[in-house]
């Protein structure tokens, strides 16, 4: 959906809300509407007491609304309002969403109390918080629902700027005791603090791609441009291996712990992982099943590297599904053929494909739409045939976010036009020229982890 179409829909929505008797106005940009409505009465049962609210203020985001006022309801997720024909129907949707949210917080309170965590309702009656065992009294964790906890900006994260707001949310932090919860939260806070303060190590290819709007179609060497993640101190300090991978055309990144490796996937996608078998107190083998839990990843090849060859570790690596097992030192040239097989093998799909239709444009002109998307790929139906191997700049329209994304993508396969259907092309994303890959990952994560409809 283009900008003109979004503005047209916003104007129609403005007329519809005004006809319901709401005070409504377009926000700057003309894509969203801000509206104010009177509530018909009846208290909202907060966590500690019922409260009377006279007005509701919200902003639209497509067919959904975000409550802005009263502040007690600000934590509610986006609420679908499609089909609402009156202010009372909108109010009913908001009340249903609050009932579901309040129920989730009560479940969280019972779960925390069962393991000995003393949680309490904060002033305002809309949030549930509990101490995390640090010296600063105001450093409390706040429950978003029964499984997600918002971490405090005070305490270990005081003065630390995180790259994304979602890093402050920890999923499933509960354990068997209150001590388990406290340890999990403080350890996570400390990891975030260290990660934010430590510079990232990134090795770029020797020859950077030219900064052209339309990149010329040209054959690529096998393995060129693939992303490889190295995990652990043994591999991280191996400058010869890193240089060898760079000579093969691969782009590498180094992380020194399993937690940092997993968090790296929130900002970037990798096609192959090389990991130490021993990473601090953890085992590299733990990384294999952990990667499978990351949204959008289906089966990523992981090669474990041991300080010395041990048959027992090799058997364990094979048992958990590792793609390979090597003994250090590793010569990039000697293993290049094996890496190419892992990177180009067709037997396993690395990234989950989602059947999402998005408007796209090739080189700013040829229109089309996606029939499937993934972390590093697109399947596009377009008006023109595309030649295999061609590298072009594509613009993807994320209408739900009101954002356009540009990617440089190479045509991997093509299906000619058949009957009334336009040609189809399979694209591999080579780069994100605007350095906003995390936005793409956030979008895919939202698709693979949909929130329940609070109106049902």
Image (tube, grey):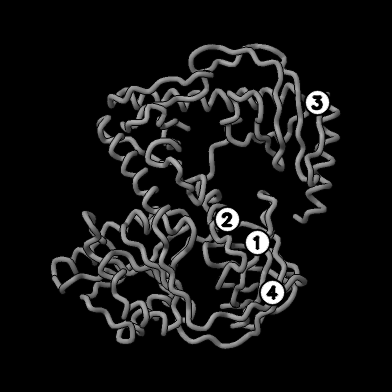
- Which SS class for mark 2? helix
As drawn, 100 above or below 149: above
Q: Quadrant of residue 65?
A: top right
Q: Name the residue under label 3.
A: 22
- Foreground mark, 2 or 3? 2
- Foreground mark, 4 or 2? 2
Say whether disc 3 or disc 4 marks the residue closer to the N-terminus.
3
Q: Name the residue under label 4.
A: 423
Mark 4 to mark 2 CA distance (whole Å): 28 Å
Q: Mark 2 points at which residue?
A: 439
- Which SS class for mark 3? loop
Q: Is residue 278 left or right of residue 339?
A: left
Q: In this view, does 159 lie to the left or right of 362?
A: left
Say whether disc 4 or disc 1 marks the residue closer to the N-terminus.
1
> Tags 1 and 2 in contact by the CB under 8 Å rule?
yes
Give x and y (percent) for residue 410. Answer: 59, 77
- Which SS class for mark 1? strand
Mark 3 to mark 1 CA distance (whole Å): 35 Å
Query: In the depicted view, which residue is nearer to us: 185 or 304?
Result: 185
Say whether disc 4 or disc 2 marks the residue closer to the N-terminus.
4
Give x and y (percent) for residue 192. Answer: 39, 48
Mark 3 to mark 4 CA distance (whole Å): 47 Å
**Which residue is painted at 65% across and 66% down in the image?**
406
Q: Which mark is residue 375?
A: none
Give x and y (percent) for residue 423. Answer: 69, 74
Q: Name the residue under label 1.
A: 405
Residue 456 visible to an observer of this rendering:
no
């Amino acid at each position: 959906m283009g900008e003109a179409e979004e503005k047209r829909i916003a104007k129609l929505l403005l007329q519809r809300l005004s006809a319901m008797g709401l005070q409504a106005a377009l926000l700057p940009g003309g894509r969203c509407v801000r509206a104010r409505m009177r509530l018909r009465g009846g208290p909202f049962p907060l966590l500690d007491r019922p409260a009377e609210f006279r007005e509701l203020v919200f902003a639209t985001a497509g067919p959904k609304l975000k409550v802005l006022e009263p502040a007690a309801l600000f934590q509610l997720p986006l609420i679908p309002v499609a089909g609402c024909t009156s202010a009372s129907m909108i109010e009913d949707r908001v009340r249903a969403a609050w009932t579901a949210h309040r129920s989730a917080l009560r479940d969280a309170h019972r779960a925390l109390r069962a393991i000995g965590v003393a949680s309490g309702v904060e002033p305002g009656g809309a949030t549930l918080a509990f101490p995390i065992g640090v010296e600063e009294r105001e450093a409390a964790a706040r429950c978003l629902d029964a499984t997600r906890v918002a971490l405090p900006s005070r305490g270990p994260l005081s003065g630390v700027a995180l790259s994304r707001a979602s890093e402050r949310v920890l999923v499933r932090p509960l354990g068997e005791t209150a001590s388990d919860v406290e340890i999990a939260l403080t350890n996570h806070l400390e990891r975030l603090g260290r990660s934010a303060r430590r510079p990232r190590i990134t090795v770029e290819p020797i020859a950077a791609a030219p900064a052209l709007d339309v990149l010329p179609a040209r054959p690529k060497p096998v393995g060129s441009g693939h992303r490889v993640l190295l995990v652990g101190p043994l591999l991280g300090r191996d400058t010869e291996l890193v240089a060898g991978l760079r000579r093969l055309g691969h782009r590498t990144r180094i992380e020194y712990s399993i937690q940092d490796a997993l968090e790296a996937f929130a900002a970037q996608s990798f096609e192959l992982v090389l990991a130490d078998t021993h990473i601090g107190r953890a085992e590299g083998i733990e990384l294999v099943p952990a990667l499978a839990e990351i949204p959008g990843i289906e089966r990523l090849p992981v090669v474990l590297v041991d300080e010395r060859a041990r048959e027992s570790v090799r058997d364990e690596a094979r048992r958990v599904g590792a793609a390979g097992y090597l003994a250090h030192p590793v010569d990039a040239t000697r293993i290049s053929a094996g890496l190419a097989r892992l990177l180009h093998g067709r037997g396993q799909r690395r990234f989950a494909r989602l059947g999402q239709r998005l408007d796209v444009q090739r080189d700013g002109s040829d229109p089309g739409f996606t029939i499937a998307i993934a972390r590093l790929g697109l399947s596009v139906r377009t008006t023109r045939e595309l030649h295999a191997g061609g590298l072009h700049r594509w613009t993807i329209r994320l209408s739900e976010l009101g954002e356009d994304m540009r990617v440089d993508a190479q045509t991997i396969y093509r299906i000619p036009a058949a009957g009334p259907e336009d040609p189809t092309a399979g694209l591999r994303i080579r780069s994100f020229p605007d350095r906003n890959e995390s936005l793409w990952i956030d979008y895919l994560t939202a698709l693979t982890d949909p929130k329940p409809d609070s109106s049902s």
